[in-house]
Structures are given as C-alpha cells and as structure tokens.
Image (cartoon, helix red, strand yellow):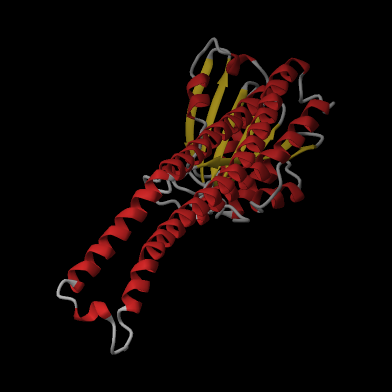
Amino acid sequence: MTSSVKTKKHETQMEVYEFGEGIFKKHLITDPEQIKPFLEITHKFWINLYGLENETLLKEISELFNIHPLTLEDIKNTSQRPKFEEFEENIFVVSKMIYYKNRSLEPITEQVSILFGKNYIISIQENPFDIFDPIRSRLENPTGKMRKMGTDYFAYTLLDAIVDQYFDCLEHAVEKIETLEDNIISQSKKTKLPEIFHQRKSIQQIKRTVWPTRELLSAWKKSESPLVKKKTNPFINDVYEHVIEIIENLEIQRESISALVELFMSNLSLKQNEVMKTLTIIATIFIPLTFIAGVYGMNFQFMPELGWKYGYFFIWILFLGSTLAMVYYFKRKKWF
C-alpha cells in the first residue's frame, strides 16, 4: 500500500466563523462575493472549505486573499508533502489527516491545507469528514483562548487536532496487532501471513505521513514571521513532542510486527512438526505390522503356521500386542 485510500470528491462548500472577544457568528456561504464584507472587519474569522471540485471558486478566493499561484496549485494537488511556507501576507501549512472510516482495515489519508494571515484563517479539506468539531465548540466559549489569541494560535489548534487523530490511528493499529498476536498464540482464529503484512504496510503509511509533520513543526518553531507570535511557541513545542512520541511508538509497533512475523513462522513450524510427528508415529506403528503381514503373505508352500488352526487369531493378537507396546513406549517417552 503505497498510497492512501481516496474517498470520492465532493462539491465545494464553505462555512465562515466570525469571532473575537465578545463576538461569535457562523455563516454558510456559497459565493466568494459573500466573503468580501469579512475583509473589512477588525476581529478574526475562519473560513472552513471542503471539496476541490470548483476550481473557479478556489481561484476567486485566492485572489481575495492574495494567495500565491504556486500555493493554489499545492492546495489542488492533494499529494503534497506536509510543509510550512512563509509569505509576506500569510503563512501556508500543508498537513495530512489520517483516519479509519467505519473501523476499516486501511487508513484513509486526506490533505488539509491551512492559510492564516493577520486576522483570518482558511482551512481547505478534500471531503466533508473532519475532526474540528471540538474547535467549533471551543469557539463558542466567550472566555476561551480561541477568542483572545491570534490566528497563529488558531492554526495551531487545527494542527493539534490533526496530530491528536494520529494517536487514535496508532491506537487502532496497536489493537489490531494485539488481536493478531492473540489469534496466533491461542490459535482460536486462523491468521494468515498477508494480514500481518497488511498491518505492517498500514504502520508504514502512518509513519510516512507523521514523519514530515515533524519537519513542518520544526520549521514553524524557527519562523521569524510577524504572523507567528512568541507566546504560541510553547504550544507548537507541545505538538512537536507529541509527533516525536508518535514516531517512537510507530517504531515500536514496526518491531512488534517483525516479532509477530517470527511468532507466526515459529507457530507454523511447530504445527508442521506436530503433523510430521503424528505421521512418523503412525508410520512407525505400521512398520512391524507390515513386516508380519509381509512374512505371512509370502507364497511358500511349507510354512508351519499356515496350517495352524489358530494362526489367524494369533496374527491379530500379534498385531494388537505390538501396536499397544509401541503406543505405551511412545507415551513413556512423552512423544504424544
């Protein structure tokens, strides 16, 4: 699995949250012309946009906020690597949101583009699904930091929500690995090797997404842009430490997957040994029986036992006696 699972594209939609100390309003808009009044206000506003189908709308928004043409291309190209770019009037952040839809086996990766300027934040997603509901709730709190802090802090909260989702994905992966391990050890459910490798690929996909996020945050910490306030740095450091923790945990899970493969192969080898032991015991029991049957199956005319009245019964007693003797011997040796 070298690429993320993509969901279908959706028609571009927008919602605007107007907020500040003592003010909070939500607007649903469909036309970029409706954004123009917000450009005149002094308090902050957040435009949350999802769907990349309407390129005309995206272009009009980029003109309203003086977004660089290359940045617009990066927004539309959803295969971008997470990054942090500074411009004179705004800062552009590309991040990746990872989630499991309906607890599916394969993680879904979606690009989230974030632009913030002096008093605005724009977040652009591919699909309606997002993890920003807690942020919307925090905006409604008139005494919360969301109302008082700058746009860089708001952008941090969006990124923090995305990173927190990485923990959920990691937890899902850990649960799956533990389930596979329990199934292999208990043999209660047949586990196939492709399931283990599939889980390893999922871990690798998450790691490929999380790793450049560390570089993004490192660049943010070093930024000297006037749009990034020093009082936001402790929060960025906190997210950075979370990302480092996730990467370390992913390394641990990758090692767990390797151990799981070894456990699977050992278990498989043990099963094969058990089968071979059973077949060997059966073959060993039949060796003397085959020998006795072969002796008395020879076509010699003068064999004393052939004319004996109880010869047939004697042979069966010999068969059963040798079999029971070998079974007793094998049990004494604890071969089964």
- Left or right, 131 with reference to 183: right
Instruction: Give the quarter of the figure containing the N terminus.
Output: bottom right
The image shows residue 89 at horizontal and vertical percentages of: 78, 34
Please name the residue shown 56% across and 52% down the image. 197
The image shows residue 256 at horizontal and vertical percentages of 59, 39
Residue most extreme to the top: 143
| The one of 6 and 291 positioned closer to us in this rendering | 291
Asked if residue 306 is positioned above or below residue 212 in the image, the reply reads below
Q: Is residue 240 above or below residue 291?
A: above
Left or right placement of residue 315 versus residue 136 in this view: left
Q: Is residue 233 visible?
A: yes
Query: From what the image shows, is residue 303 above or below residue 315?
Result: below
Side of 174 relative to 222 (left or right): left
Which of the pair 152/206 is nearer the observer?
A: 206
Is residue 35 placed above or below 78 in the rendered structure? above
Decide which of 82, 144 is in the foreground and name it: 82
At x 52%, y 56%, the residue is: 194
Q: How many marks?
A: 0
Q: Position of residue 59 (x, y in %)?
A: 65, 50
Residue 106 location (% of width, % of height): 51, 49
On the image, which quarter does residue 112 sit in? top right
- Residues 285 and 224: in front is 285
Residue drawn at 74 percent across, 15 percent down: 231
Q: Is residue 65 visible?
A: no
